[in-house]
Amino acid sequence: MSLSLIGKSISASATLKLNETAAILKAKGEPIIHLGGGEPKSKAPLDAIISAVSLLNSGEVRYTPADGLPALKQAIIRYTEEFYNRKVSPLNVIASSGAKQAIMVALQAIVNPQEEVIFPAPYWVSYSEMVKLCGGVGVPVLPEDGSFYPALDDIARVVTSYTKAVIINSPNNPTGAMYSEQFIAEIVEFCEKRSIWLIMDDIYHRLIFDGRRPINCYKYAKDLTENSKLIVINGASKQYAMTGFRIGWAVANKRLIEVMTNIQGHQTSGPSAVTQLAAVGALNGLQSSVESLRMTLENNRNIMMDRLQAFDGVKVTKPDGTFYCFADFSHYNKNSTKLANFLLDKVRVATVPGIEFGLEGYLRLSTCGSVKDITEGIERIKWALDPNSPNELYIGQRKLVRDWL
């Protein structure tokens, strides 16, 4: 079969593939515990549902502008002013079918073949594939100090004449690390001086713990004109538990937004009118659901940390935000793909291999589920790996006997 070079180079999304596998096993009646998921289990805000239902009841569900409905753009403008102290116009905003599409369209608008896009590692699984889809070259960068917190020098040492953009995701998927305010200030200044595009993926910026506050990248930008190369990405999926609604957005200079709109117009047209109005409801409605989710996730983080830290051989850095723990299981198996498959096969616990995020030997564990999921999931993993665990384990009425240690 004759396929394009780009088509042959793109791999499936590891997280979406895992979700599919777990769903199939669960549908067959298998006692799956999904510790690999990237979506909150809480319900979407009532204001979002009411807004969507209102439009559905009208029966007037039509095409939308390629860059989003005016009502949603106004809600995003208000959100940007509230959380970034930055007043922008509708021409600075594009609404997309998820933050993923907003990032993809931004990359298509700025990256030429063979140009490089830098992102700290570990990194979200789609960054590297998105850059490939543009014909560009992804450049993941592991911090030299071995931590999950990059320094400016880590980024600066890989910048070349081919560097077109830097992507910063803080708090970070998969590590939960929230980068320091000093680093954000330095990377904003660095990219401005070098005339490099800076994409701030802020999708988790309100889901942070231990009294932390969101960091405003605009605070450190000296160029806030229409020549600015700062792009801020956000969306409804994570903070409002609206993953299936697929609404995200980008805020950037007017010319870039115009080009992104042209591209998106040919790709998908505007996002669904129903889900856009749901996002308007979420953004303009009561915000208590965000704080409730944040508190639940912080509690779940603490429970998972307690369980993992009592697990000999596992090393884990306490996440500052998001709903993930990125734990080092290399003591048991340095091949994270084999380890994840082993755990799914033997004890029906779904995790995501660290290699998918650019770091081998780790597993990404989600804290999105219930406390029962977390405690029982870690208990099953411990039973499967720890030679000091009992030789038998009951999962429901099923008796498992460990015959591999």
Image: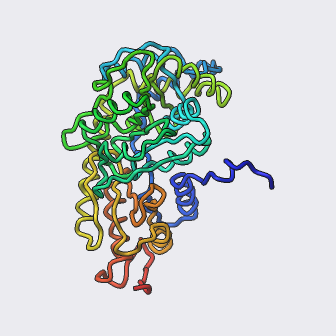
Q: Position of residue 117 (x, y in %)?
A: 49, 41
Quarter of the image with the N terminus in it? bottom right
Q: Position of residue 158 (x, y in %)?
A: 42, 46
* Residue at the left extreme of this rendering: 211
Q: Considering only vertical position in the picture, is 403 above or below 326?
A: below
Q: Position of residue 401 (x, y in %)?
A: 42, 84
In the rendered view, how is the structure colored? rainbow
Write the residue at 39% across / 63% down. 362
* Left or right of 102, for residue 60: right
Q: How many marks?
A: 0
Quarter of the image with the C terminus in it? bottom left
* Residue at the right extreme of this rendering: 1
Q: Considering only vertical position in the picture, is 290 above or below 21?
A: above
Write the residue at 52% across / 32% down. 102
Q: Position of residue 364 (x, y in %)?
A: 40, 58
Q: Considering only vertical position in the picture, is 402 above or below 299?
A: below
Question: Is 152 or 291 nearer to us in this picture?
Answer: 152
Q: Considering only vertical position in the picture, is 388 above or below 203?
A: below
**Quarter of the image where one finds residue 294:** top left
Question: Is 296 or 4 nearer to us in this picture?
Answer: 4
Write the residue at 76% across / 51% down. 3
Write the residue at 33% across / 35% down. 187
**Quarter of the image where one finds residue 223:** top left
